[in-house]
């Protein structure tokens, strides 16, 4: 992680921002309004994927 990078936890983001991150294109392109999402270029989002076993 680069020094000075801001870190956000996925579950602390707004639902709108969570949805935008979860549906990002495979190339990683996001359509997020940085003025309302608290995210900026170079920020890091911490996320862990869960799998349900049935």
Image (tube, grey):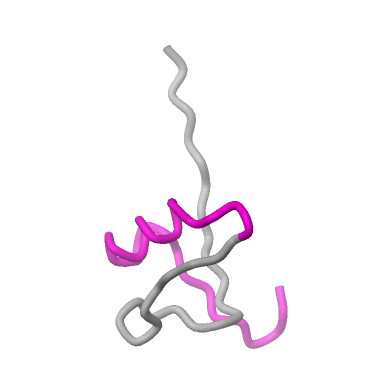
Quarter location, residue 32: bottom left
Lateral position of residue 44 relative to residue 22, left or right: right
Lateral position of residue 43 relative to residue 21, left or right: right
Q: Position of residue 44 (x, y in %)?
A: 57, 71
Q: Position of residue 54 (x, y in %)?
A: 42, 12
Quarter location, residue 6: bottom right
Residue at image location 35% in from the left, 65% down from the top: 17
Q: Position of residue 48 (x, y in %)?
A: 52, 47
Stretch in magenta: 1-27
Lateral position of residue 45 relative to residue 13, left or right: right
Magenta-span inclusion, residue 18? yes
Would you place residue 14 above or below residue 24 in this image? below
Would you place residue 4 above or below residue 16 in this image? below
Residue at image location 45% in from the left, 63% down from the top: 9
Quick one: quadrant of the N terminus?
Answer: bottom right
Q: Residue furthest top?
A: 54
Q: Nearer the viewer, residue 37 or 23?
A: 23
Quarter location, residue 36: bottom left
Q: Residue furthest right?
A: 2
Q: Position of residue 2 (x, y in %)?
A: 72, 80
Q: Nearer the viewer, residue 24 or 45?
A: 24
Residue at image location 59% in from the left, 61% down from the top: 28
Residue at image location 61% in from the left, 82% down from the top: 5
Q: Disc count in the image?
A: 0
């Amino acid at each position: 992680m680069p020094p000075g990078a801001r870190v956000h936890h996925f579950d602390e983001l707004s639902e709108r921002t969570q949805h935008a991150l979860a549906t990002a294109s495979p190339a990683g392109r996001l359509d997020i309004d940085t003025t309302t999402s608290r995210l900026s270029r170079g920020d890091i989002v911490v996320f862990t994927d869960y799998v349900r076993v049935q």
